[in-house]
Amino acid sequence: AGRLPFALGLRGGGAGLPPWMRHVHRRFSSQRRFSSASNEGASAQQTSGGIRGALAKYNALNEAHPTTTKVGTSVVILLFGDTMAQRIQHRSAAKTSEDGAAPAFRMDWRRLAAFASFGAIYTGYFQMHWFRYLQTVFPRQVGLKTRFLRKDVLAPLLVNQLGMVCVGYYPFFFAWTGFVRGRTWDESMEEMKKKYKLKLLAQNWAFWIPAQGVQFALVPSLYHILYVSAMGLAWNTILSLVTLEKIPQAAEELKRKKA
């Protein structure tokens, strides 16, 4: 009970303490606040330093091996994206059987290879040269106050999204992924006719027009493929979900269990 007044004095900011103890309490509290702020600042500096260090290493690789770095970046991100998509599709397609046991997940390796190789050829290699060409045709404008409503931003954005994406990106996507997965040309074209519709283009534009507006307006050309690949982590997962059929093993295993 004798400790109660002292505790109340501490909780009240030291108002209930004798004058000499109030001075000690204020000094101790300020030291704690300074120490906490210093720790938070050091943590932020370490995080910032880690990001700068990673970018410095990426820059060094990009300068020494530009093609390999860009292609490798695209492949790694696309592999991760389709792996996520396959797991999402497995969970949605493989409904729990009557005995409560869910079918085991099995990776579709040909599908993964199709998506990764498409990313290596189109995202990593072709777009590296394509973006460079667009910036040559529409050089960056200096001295304008606006960042987005500029010719060097809107022109490459519209040429890419309304031109190349429609006549190059999607036709090549369906043809190449069908080829790697062992389909005939007629089968690949039939799948493209079935899935390549205005809804898919609208989804593409809703995601990529804002994303590439930021790319052409704010992102240095050195990081274009890195930025597109990072944004593509989300988009390629969506594309994989809406264009590549659900994993068949889950449904087959469920049928065997019911039989």
Image: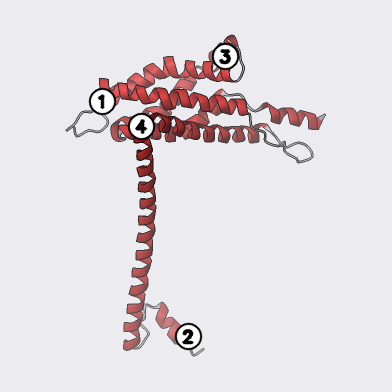
Q: CA distance from mark 1 to mark 4?
A: 15 Å
Q: Please give the residue where the numbered disc 3 appears in the rendered image.
A: 188
Q: Quadrant of residue 180?
A: top right
Q: CA distance from mark 2 to mark 3?
A: 80 Å
Q: Earlier in the sequence, mark 2 or mark 3?
A: 2
Amino acid residing under circle 3: Ser
Q: Earlier in the sequence, mark 4 or mark 2?
A: 2
Amino acid residing under circle 2: Leu
Question: Could you say where residue 27 lies in the image, as x and y percent from the top left?
Answer: 32, 78
Residue pictured at 50% horizontal, 19% vertical: 173
Question: Could you say where residue 110 lies in the image, as x and y percent from the top left?
Answer: 61, 25
Residue pictured at 38% horizontal, 55% vertical: 46
Position of 75 compared to 58: left or right?
right
Q: Please give the residue where the numbered disc 4 appears in the rendered image.
A: 224
Residue pictured at 57% horizontal, 12% vertical: 190
Secondary structure, mark 3, is: helix
Amino acid residing under circle 1: Asp
Q: Earlier in the sequence, mark 1 or mark 4?
A: 1
Are circles 1 and 2 on residues that touch, CB within 8 Å?
no
Secondary structure, mark 2, is: helix
Mark drawn on residue 4: 2
Question: Could you say where residue 116 lies in the image, as x and y percent from the top left?
Answer: 52, 28
